[in-house]
Amino acid sequence: MGLLMCCVVEQHEGGTNPTESMTRALINEDSIARQSGPVQLGFPEKHYDPEEYYPCFVAGVILRERIPAFERMLWRACRGNVFLRQAEIETPLEDPSTGDQVYKSVFIIFFQGDQLKTRVKKICEGFRATLYPCPEAPTDRREMAMGVMTRIEDLNTVLGQTQDHRHRVLVAAAKNIKNWFVKVRKIKAIYHTLNLFNLDVTQKCLIAECWVPVLDLENIQLALRRGTERSGSSVPPILNRMDTPEDPPTYNHTNKFTSAFQVLYDSYGIASYREMNPTPYTIITFPFLFAIMFGDLGHGSLMTIFAAWMVLKEKPLAAKKSDNEIWNIFFGGRYIILLMGLFSMYTGLIYNDVFGKSLNVFGTSWAVNLNKSFVENLKEPYMLDPAKSDYIGYPYPFGMDPVWQLAKNKIIFHNSFKMKISIILGVTHMLFGVAISLFNNLYFKNKLGIICEFIPQVIFLVFLFFYMVILMFIKWIKYYANFDDKTRGSSCAPSVLITFINMVLSKDTPYVKECETPNMYAGQDAIQKFLLMCAFICIPWILLAKPIMIMRSRKAANQYSVTHNQLNSATENGDAEQPMHNNTSQPPPAAHGGGHDEEPMSEIFIHQAHSQLSEVLWSMVLNKGLTVDGWSGVLMEGLSAFLHTLRLHWVEFCTKFYSGNGYAFQPFSFELILDSASQSKEE
């Protein structure tokens, strides 16, 4: 049947074949010969091999997209003397080399002769088709199919059992995988640390040089003894303190409450070793200055509730390990937010501000005693006079009188009050920072810092800005609400801001002719001129004195180095007649520059201008916060009070004493190692 099909294809595709009748005759002859042996058919008897005329076939599978090209190649290479049948395999198969899902087709090719057989197999090999043996006899094919099905069932059974076993093993391992990871990381950290040790000359013990906190020396000795006992070692460990010229790392002991405040300064730079740490003072000053700007009882209450919830739910929230960066920032600063909320509630009570409204708890101290006809005939706003009967006579017990909500000059009064409070607290804050610099300079024995920085800064701040604060208190004490008094009435009270501006510009302060004088006290003009002159002298003192002293010190040191080398060279050549005196063998005393020996002079001048902290604040916080798009930018804009408070601490406070040139102490801690590993895994 296969030969007949092949002949039909040849006739259809290749046209009329002249050997068709001969082929059929051979088939009939062969069938007769198979039945009764050689028979005389009217032509001479000939001997032939019947297998030469029976068709051969190959079967296999090939990629589905290669079928058209495969069929054309067979047709052209075999000149149409093959018959191809193919069927698509619906189920995708997995490529064992790549693991991808591919679609294939099964094919069978009929041909005749060994020459075509070789050619067909080469074409199949070229198209990377997979050939499978297929017996000719139907019984053999059925047996092979049954064998294949049996093998498939056996393989499915093995695969199922293997998958079940693998699942059981993985489930059992999953219970311990976290502990295994922890143990492996701990072991790797221990071996990594041991690789940093040095061998002594005897090659029998390890020597390690490391930094440890002095307060923890006893705990470290106890830990070493405990480790010796548990390991069964007979050699006790030895712990000795060493002297080194290197700068030690900075270690600030913190807890979950103080760590967030410490990060505020570590984000700019680690404090130098033994430099005074501003974090303890910031725990109070930061939330308080924030509250001065944010003060609102309603918003402060919401902030306090949110922070209190994070503090009370601290352990379960910390165990969740959220990937949300905004949430992690809020949760890490939960104690800062809590204090900012509490302080904002306090200042909100002082301002009597609750969501922009006021609370009338104690009753107003103002009473309007105006008749109806007087009010109806008013053509302009009428201002109540506190010196007259409209004022009851006692101030509001706590905070501002709620009647200010109805006043036309409410905003002017509130802004003036808040501005004066901010100036007083800001100047006090800066003076406190300058006072801290004195303690740093005394500890490091930095005379140059005291003479060239502390003294002129104190003079400049006190003679200008603190003097303005004194004027505020003088105005509050000397003047009162009485429009008729021409010396101490409110109409003659000079503006502190205008007075200060005219003082700097050396101009006379204008005043009303009815008032006797624009001054708040006798001799004010002369004192202000003296203070202004001293303040102007301090400007070049602050900017130039220290760099000039450092330049002179370096020049003297270089001259000594050249002279010392020349004397040594002359002594070696025998030219020196007398040895050097003892007083010339020592270098000249260098000025205490606070670690500026290798720093370029340009950097020293920039440090004297105090621009580094301002640049870091802009690049790290303000610039990023103001340029972020989307809801993150809205969030940063809502935190403007926080950013301004951070600026006050970084620029106005820290520049007076904080250098931030140190590096952090990194102890060997399994907790830190595991936290860093988990964070890197999440990233």
Image (cartoon, grey):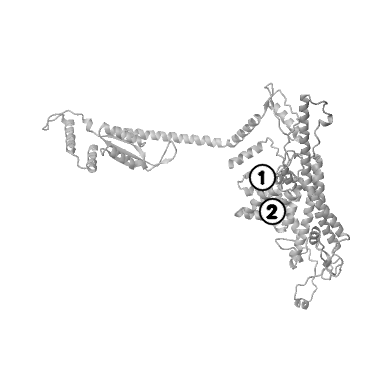
Of the pair 637 and 45, the residue shown nearer to us: 637
The x, y position of residue 259, in whole percent, is 71, 44
Task: Give the SS element for disc 1.
Answer: helix
Q: Which residue is mark 1?
A: 315
The x, y position of residue 280, in whole percent, is 76, 45
Could you tell me if residue 136 is visible in this image? no
Residue at coordinates 75% horizontally, 60% vertically from top-left? 351
Nearer the N terminus, badge 1 or badge 2? 2
**For the C terminus, which image quadrant?**
top right
The x, y position of residue 301, in whole percent, is 71, 56
Of the pair 236 and 206, the residue shown nearer to us: 206
Q: Amino acid at mark 2?
A: Ile
Task: Give the SS element for disc 2.
Answer: helix
Q: Which residue is mark 2?
A: 305
Of the pair 173 and 380, the residue shown nearer to us: 380
Q: Are marks 1 and 2 in contact (CB under 8 Å)?
A: no
Q: Amino acid at mark 1?
A: Lys
Residue 75 position by quadrant: top left
Residue 92 position by quadrant: top left
* Left or right position of 207 against 132: right
